[in-house]
Structures are given as C-alpha cells and as structure tokens.
Image (cartoon, grey):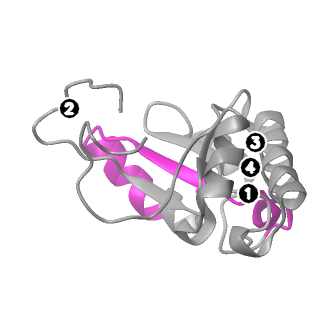
Amino acid sequence: MNNHNLPNKCVVLTADDAYQSIAENAYPLLQKYQMSMSVFVATDSIDRKYKAMMTWQKMRDTQGKTMAFYNHGTSHAHFLDLNKAQIKMQIKQAQNRLNQELGKVDKIFAYPYGESNLDILKQIKNMGYVAFGQHSGVVSTTSNL
C-alpha cells in the first residue's frame, strides 16, 4: 500500500468468474445498499455463452458505479502450470476482450484459484497490472500491494 490511511471499517467486495447469479442476486442488493463490487472475468466462458455465466450485454448493463469488471485470464487456468508466454497470452487476450466488450478496463487482475509464485507476481507487475489472489485476512498499510 502507499501508506494511505484506510478507513476504520473497510470492506472490498469481489467475485470471480461473472456468474449469472451475481447479476440476479448480488446486483439488486448492491444497488439497494449503495455498495460496489469488482467482478473478475475469465473471458472464454463468456464468449462460449455458458448458461451459468453473464453475457457481455449483461455486464454492459450492470457495469458502472455498482459493478466493475476486471481481468481473470481467458480460461481460468492454473497459472502455476503455465509458462511465461502462456500467462502473457491469457492476460493480454482477456484484457483485449474486456476492452472490446466493456470499453477501457483498468489493468487489475485476480489470480485464478489465488495461485501465483514470485516469478508470476513479477511478470504480471511488469505487464502493468495490480494483481491479487484470494487470501483471507486483514489488509493494512504494511500489506504487499
């Protein structure tokens, strides 16, 4: 973190994979309680029109103050099983799809399955992304951004 003061009670809501249930169940509650959520999208499942997933149109309809959509790779692969070129391709192709379908999307990335190692962390940082995984616990000014 950049030594900014965090509010005493700070919560960040995130969801992975852009399931339809997020639009059906979470979105109305987020609007009602004026809260926001970041949703991380593995783009192949959207492009393949899996019934359990949101459509690009549903994401366009719900994005804005309440929901923002970010990069989760193309295929939700285990990054620990991929080489650097494959990881780069996963991230770049997903970012291109997000940008094409939703407009300019910030370079924020969530590791599929929360998996990474030091080499992957460095690679994604060098690609200009802020990235994180699914790790329970407190975030503070001493946390590794």
Q: Position of 130 compared to 36: left or right?
A: right
Q: Kindly identify which residue carries mark 1.
A: 73
Mark 2: amino acid: Leu
Instruction: Give the magenta part as a residue range.
Output: 24-49
Q: Residue furthest left?
A: 8
- Above or below 62: residue 19: below
Q: CA distance from mark 3 to mark 1?
A: 10 Å
Check residue 56 in the rendering and tell me which mark sits there, or answer none. Answer: 4
Which of the 4 image quarters holds residue 73? bottom right
Q: Looking at the picture, how far across and down is residue 115, in whole percent?
A: 58, 68
Q: CA distance from mark 2 to mark 3?
A: 30 Å
Which of the 4 image quarters holds residue 106? top right
Counting residues from the N terminus, which is met first, the one under dot 2 or under dot 3?
2
Q: Secondary structure at mark 1?
A: loop
Q: Looking at the picture, how far across and down is residue 139, in whole percent?
A: 27, 48
- Above or below 130: residue 83: below
